[in-house]
Amino acid sequence: MTVQAIDETTWLTANVRPAGRLGRDDVDRLRALLDALSASASMIVLDLAATSLRAAGAVGAAGAIDDAAAQLEARGGCLLCVNADDDTCARLSGCRHAVVVGQGAPRPVGAPA
């Protein structure tokens, strides 16, 4: 696959909000979605507020997320996981390319707690 740089003048951001518990059976669907989005988006925001990673699928899900993040990063983009609970943050701690942010963090300076 040829890696093309992202057009710096036009960004396409995709927001994805999975719901429920992601397990081993869901990893292929997650990977297919992230692969498709990372091929055309500049940034993917994966909102994890409504989901949790089951132990059986956590390694596969983390791999799918990090692979898509690496593809975006190679083109100058980013995959940002937001609203991850403590358990999900721990399960995604091995991601080297995805940015994982816990629930409610970070807050803009001066924003109410």
Image (tube, rainbow, N blue to C red):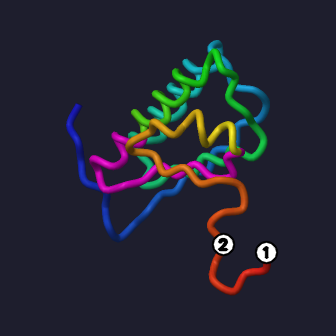
Furthest residue in direction left, as rendered: 2
Residue 97 point in image, percent of width and height: 39, 45
Magenta stretch, residue numbers:
69-85
* Number of numbered tags placed on the structure image: 2
Label 2: which secondary element: loop
Q: Rate crowding at label 2 as few (under 14), some (14 to 19) or many (20 or more) other CA atoms within 10 Å.
A: few
Residue 91 point in image, percent of width and height: 58, 33
Residue in the image at 37% along x and 55% along y: 77
Residue in the image at 75% along x and 36% along y: 51
The Cα–Cα distance between marks 2 and 1, rounded to whole angstroms, is: 8 Å
Furthest residue in direction bottom, as rendered: 110
Which quadrant of the figure has residue 26? top right
Residue in the image at 68% along x and 29% along y: 53
- Identified by mark 1, the residue type is Ala
For the N terminus, the image quarter is: top left
The relative height of residue 4 versus residue 58 in the rendered view (above or below) is below
The label on residue 113 is 1
**Magenta span contains residue 73:** yes
- Identified by mark 2, the residue type is Arg
Near-viewer residue (46 or 99): 99
Q: Of the residues under marks 2 and 1, which one precedes in the sequence?
A: 2
Residue in the image at 31% along x and 61% along y: 7
Q: Which residue is mark 2?
A: 107
Residue 63 point in image, percent of width and height: 46, 28
**Magenta span contains residue 30:** no
Q: Is residue 11 left or right of residue 107?
A: left
Near-viewer residue (34 or 59): 59
Residue 86 point in image, percent of width and height: 69, 44
Labels 2 and 1 touching (C-beta < 8 A): yes
Label 1: which secondary element: loop
